[in-house]
């Protein structure tokens, strides 16, 4: 099992390549890129730069909160564009050229993406371990959208309270989950519990949600200043 801190620490930028399925499987392709995006965010929070390339069909990065690729094309073009061969590969199939690590991403069966809130799709996919298959309905994605809306309103409300430090136990739990296996599902469960935790001050809830959103990429602070 990949441990980010143990296996990806080192000097210079970390080069990552996401292999988008070439067969037009949009849900799985999006999930491969989403996992690469989360990996990059976690590594960069630990102080190491990340360069990202991807092969296969192009996606709209902005709509789904994905970071744009630094290089696209075949493996040789990506190695040239990134200034070196990627050390980490993400794929829904197999890739024999990985030199350090290869993450196998589970398939994702989704309704047509054009009809969905892209960040609701993002939160739904983040709610499952990246290696497990996901089959989501439009109703489940609508429920994810309602959760996002509720959280954004709550974060906007908490922002009006005095700031408090992130509770040390919550920060340690989230970091361990992300460092060990990119366990965004565990981080989302932590936020669900924190939302209604009466013993945690509102200012600490705000700081925790906004800090973890640097990895989740759900725009949870979008409504701050509007309520």
Image (cartoon, rainbow, N blue to C red):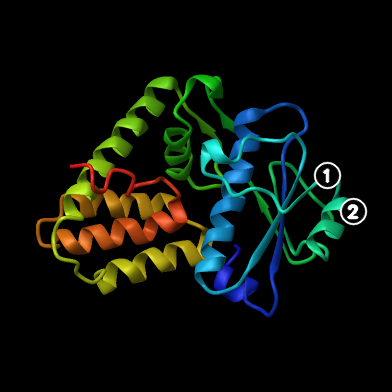
Q: Residue furthest front?
A: 225
- Are the two marked residues, 1 and 2, in contact with CB atoms closer than 8 angstroms? yes
Q: Is residue 93 left or right of residue 34?
A: right
Question: Residue 180 appears at what percent x and percent y?
Answer: 51, 65
Q: Position of residue 84 (x, y in %)?
A: 83, 66
Give the residue at mark 2.
76
Q: Quadrant of residue 127?
A: top left
Residue 31 picture quarter: top right
Which residue is at a point 50% across and 68% down the rendered structure image?
45
Residue 107 visible within the image: no
Q: Residues within 10 Å of mark 1 (few under 14, many from 20)?
A: some
Q: Position of residue 115 (x, y in %)?
A: 49, 19
* Rendering coords of residue 149 (x, y %): 29, 36
Instruction: Look at the numbered disc 1 and give the secondary structure of its residue.
Output: loop
Classify residue 33 as left or right of residue 224: right
Q: Nearer the viewer, residue 141 or 45?
A: 45
The quarter of the picture where the N terminus appears is bottom right
**Does 89 appear above or below 93?**
below
Badge 1 is on which residue? 73
Query: Could you say which is closer to the camera, residue 215 or residue 189?
Result: 215
Q: Residue furthest right?
A: 76
- Please identify the residue farthest to the left as the structure is shown: 198
Q: Using the image, determine if residue 134 lies above or below residue 183.
A: above
- In the image, farthest residue toward the bottom: 11
Quadrant location of the C terminus?
top left
């Amino acid at each position: 099992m990949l441990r980010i801190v143990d296996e990806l620490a080192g000097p210079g930028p970390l080069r990552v390549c996401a292999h988008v399925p070439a067969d037009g499987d949009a849900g799985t392709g999006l999930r491969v890129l989403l996992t690469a995006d989360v990996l990059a965010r976690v590594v960069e929070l630990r102080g190491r730069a990340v360069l990202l390339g991807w092969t296969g069909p192009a996606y709209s990065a902005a709509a789904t909160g994905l970071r744009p690729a630094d290089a696209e094309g075949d493996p040789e073009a990506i190695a040239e564009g990134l200034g070196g061969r990627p050390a980490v590969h993400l794929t829904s199939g197999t890739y024999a050229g990985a030199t350090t690590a290869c993450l196998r991403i589970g398939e994702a069966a989704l309704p047509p993406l054009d009809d969905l809130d892209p960040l609701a799709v993002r939160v739904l996919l983040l709610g499952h371990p990246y290696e497990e298959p996901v089959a989501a309905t439009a109703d489940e994605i609508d429920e994810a959208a309602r959760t996002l809306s509720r959280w954004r309103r709550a974060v906007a409300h908490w922002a009006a309270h005095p700031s408090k430090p992130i509770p040390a136990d919550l920060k340690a739990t989230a970091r361990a989950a992300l460092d060990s296996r990119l366990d965004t599902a565990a981080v989302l469960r932590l936020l669900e519990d924190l939302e209604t935790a009466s013993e945690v001050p509102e200012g600490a809830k705000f700081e925790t949600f906004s800090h973890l959103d640097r990895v989740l990429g759900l725009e949870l602070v979008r409504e701050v200043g509007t309520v």
